[in-house]
Amino acid sequence: MAYVESWNDRGSDAEFSNLWAVSSNGKTRRQLTQGSWRDRLPRWSPDDTRIAWISDRGGRAQVWVRKLESGPEIQVTNAERPPLSLAWSPDGESIAFTALVPSQMNAPAWAPEAIVPRLGRLREGYVRLFVVAASGGAARQISSGDLDGDFGIVGEPAWMPDGRSILAARDDGEIYSIRVADGTVKQLTRQGGRNEHPVPSSDGNRIAWLACERKAQSYAVRKVWVMNADGSRARVLSGSLDRDATEPQWSSESRTVYFLADDRGSTHVYAARNDGTVRQATSAAERLRGFSLADSGRAATVRATSSEGGAVYTFTVDRVSQPAVLAAPNEHLLAEREIAPAEAIEYASDGNTVQGWVVRPPDFDAAKKYPLLLDITDERRDDPRAMYGVDFSLRAQIFAARGWVVLCVNPRGTPGYGEVFGNLLRTRDPGDDFDDLMRGVDFVAAKGYVDTNRLAVAGGLVAAWAIGHTDRFRAAVVARLPGDRLGPRWEDPDLYVKHTPVFFAREFRTPTLVLADDGDREGEELYRALQSRKVESALVRMGPVEKPGERVLEMEAILGWLRR
């Protein structure tokens, strides 16, 4: 199997990634590409002798191909815009890929010629579908006619087994079949909502895909659907499973669709059969990222646990077997350090059961008192549609190593707990989620080992909301506030005022560090409000978050503020 391994380069302050291959028993591992660039999205050819991927070597991302055993690496495309996704044709002769095509602006009659390049546009362009020979050459755009206009393609394309057409979702929420020969388009889904990730069965008779039904609510569970190849007889395949499905994969005999779904901090594999039954295939406390299924029924994924930072491992989906680790690049690094355990907690909040995780310092002594950090940043970045879980958190480990008890919570609105729980954040956002977080602080504080005079909070929008609604925190860190999360301000100005942190500036008392990107209007506005209220505060302008050095600097700034 092939996978991507990333690393940070201190000298260039950049993150790079290369391709690796590992045998199915994990005994043989070798590097397929090597260089200071970013390789991603490896895809095997149908005969498993070649691999295609996207690489930005040379300064601009392109599709590349190489034979697994020997031979040169061949640049297949010469696209003006970087390819976003790719897929092999069933015969291995062609590769489909998507790329952004800039919009053509028709100059208005009133505009002087020198003004035209400066005219604003709501959209830079549209993602289109192309086909290129696997040996290289000129690419041919095939998404034309009905797929042009005002919509572009989203996600990865998928070839039908006969090689005559390609399935693709577009950003109008529907799935289409595009004939390779002439670009003829046929709409396959018509039930509304958001339809995405089409996957044809190996016999070509059915198509599985993911869909969220259109509902008058803030959140709807994403389910696995199936239809005939012509779009008829569409129905839900994942039954009553009340969790968001991802990564659908057909079994080799085209009877079962396997998929991933987050559930209460973990990720599990599920199997949905054509008869409507759904079986949970895995049950361990782990997070899974990426999912590939071989014809033999053996699956591969990247697993993370509270003590394992990410390992490639394999298991069988149709029978109970012992998972096998194929590659664990971080194993030796983590073995040299003491990893603080993460404890799952549950508590009641406004009639709901809320789940969270507590990471305590190494050599923790329950008889002592520790400062507590309510951390609502990490990978969530204040996104109520992301879930904390049992996976390894480097950020929490760093804080714990500095003596902090770290609390991470999944408040109402978080997926992984069902559609009802995910839909509890309607208009009080932030607000109700903040209430859940504070009850989590009370729950942990009641255990007796928290110094309630040394509470801190770190996050984005919800942390900014917190400093206007409680004075319990001795320190706060507000990082990279999102803009207009509540939608256009003019649509509901009263809602905007009620749920925008700066409108509660009269209650600001907590010493606050604001981390803001260049042009971060919301962060600067919050800092000015803190200063006008004469609250101890500082504003640090951060660079691009994708630079490893910036992430280190951000962590050092937070640690410095918390220990001041």
Image: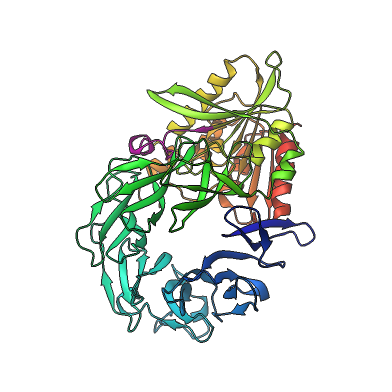
Q: Nearer the viewer, residue 87 or 531?
A: 87
Point out the residue furthest to the right here: 11
Q: Is residue 380 left or right of residue 545?
A: left
Is there any visible trace of residue 490 in the rendered image? no
The answer to which image quadrant residue 19 occupies is bottom right
Would you place residue 38 above or below residue 533 in this image? below
Q: Position of residue 459 (x, y in %)?
A: 58, 39
Q: Which region is colored magenta?
A: 409-426
Name the magenta segment's main secondary structure. loop
Would you place residue 152 above or below residue 245 in this image? below
Q: Nearer the viewer, residue 232 or 297?
A: 297
Q: How many marks?
A: 0
Q: Position of residue 78 (x, y in %)?
A: 56, 81
Q: Is residue 397 left or right of residue 100?
A: right
Q: Position of residue 28 (x, y in %)?
A: 66, 57
Image quadrant containing the C terminus = top right
Residue at image coords 66%, 19%: 453
Would you place residue 413 above or below residue 136 in this image? above
Point out the residue furthest to the left here: 233
Q: Position of residue 390 (x, y in %)?
A: 55, 36
Residue at image coords 43%, 31%: 432
Q: Is residue 545 left or right of residue 483?
A: right
Residue at image coords 63%, 43%: 527
The answer to which image quadrant residue 385 occupies is top left
Residue at image coords 30%, 49%: 273
Please check the rendered image and state whether residue 416 is part of the magenta-colored stretch, yes or no. Answer: yes
